[in-house]
Amino acid sequence: MHRIEHRACFGGWQDVYRHASETLGCTMDFAVYLPPQAEDRELPVLYWLSGLTCTEQNFITKAGAQRYAAEHGVILVAPDTSPRGEDVADAEGYDLGKGAGFYLNATRQPWAAHYRMHDYVVEELPALVQAHFPTNGLRAVSGHSMGGHGALVAALRNPGRYRSVSAFSPIVSPSKVPWGEKAFAAYLGEDREAWKAWDACELVKAAQEKLPLLVDQGGEDEFLDAQLRPQLLQAAAVAAGHPLQLRMRPGYDHSYYFVASFIGEHIAHHAAALHGEAKAHAGVAPHDPHDGCCGHL
């Protein structure tokens, strides 16, 4: 692993690292923001998963998240969205192949050779972060669009691994929308039963852990009705008795202007859960991350 970018930012450092991934069988880049508090103590980590066509750069250059991470003392880690390299399978179009890993473990060739983004973001990358950065081992996960899907699925499939989860404009049920149907058919094959293991609406039904889900959705999102359909997650959560806060934001679209507008609230939400755990060990009651939030859809 070696550092390829190093920039001062809000009293801390915005870095990008490159390493050889055993899980993906290729070289990967990931971004790490170390807030100023990291100089003298271990901190929790918020993992951010980006959407279709993105790399680690979109979040660190457009979201303005470093300001809030510095305020709350949270490390930010943002991986790329798919495996990369000349020998990595790809496809025409933006919604399959490179830049569109969908944070799952592919089982169908030629994708299965490299496309294991779930294992990468849940296991390999956190192990690397734990080994090389001043983290206390506490984690949260968030993301946007395809990455919102990835964040929800990562939390629901791995009970106890994350202290909190949130998403912006997530693809809540990829099994039922064109983006997901195309990707799942390619990566997993035509058996729709196998798709359920990577669909948040299906996972909520049998979730072993009732980790509250926080979702923000723009009311003017151009993909709202065809690709995102947050009402499906709401219905699944209600049926399963799973805590969900789904906040519709009138006027906002699918862009990073939307993410930048509310990323501060999301980081505060995660910081309350992450630092609340430390306070709980010290005998201090943790803050409820939902206090003062907007109502349900």
Image (spheres, rainbow, N blue to C red):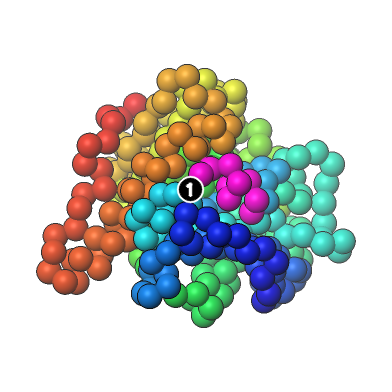
268 relative to 127 in the view: left or right: left
Quadrant of residue 114 in the image? bottom right
Res 278 → quadrant: bottom left
Q: Residue 165 in the image: x percent, y percent?
A: 40, 51
> Residue 29 or 173: which is nearer the viewer?
29
Magenta run includes residue 53: no
Q: Quadrant of the N terminus?
A: bottom right
Circle 1 is placed at which residue position?
Answer: 65
Residue in the image at 69% along x and 56% along y: 82
**Image spot of residue 250 (x, y percent):** 43, 20
Residue 227: tell me if it is visible. Answer: yes
Residue in the picture at 33% in, 48% down: 269
Q: Secondary structure at mark 1?
A: helix
**Range covered by the magenta-colored residues:** 56-65
Tell me where residue 272 appears, x and y as whole percent.
28, 54
Residue in front for this viewpoint, 123 or 134: 134
| Res. 42 image quadrant | bottom left
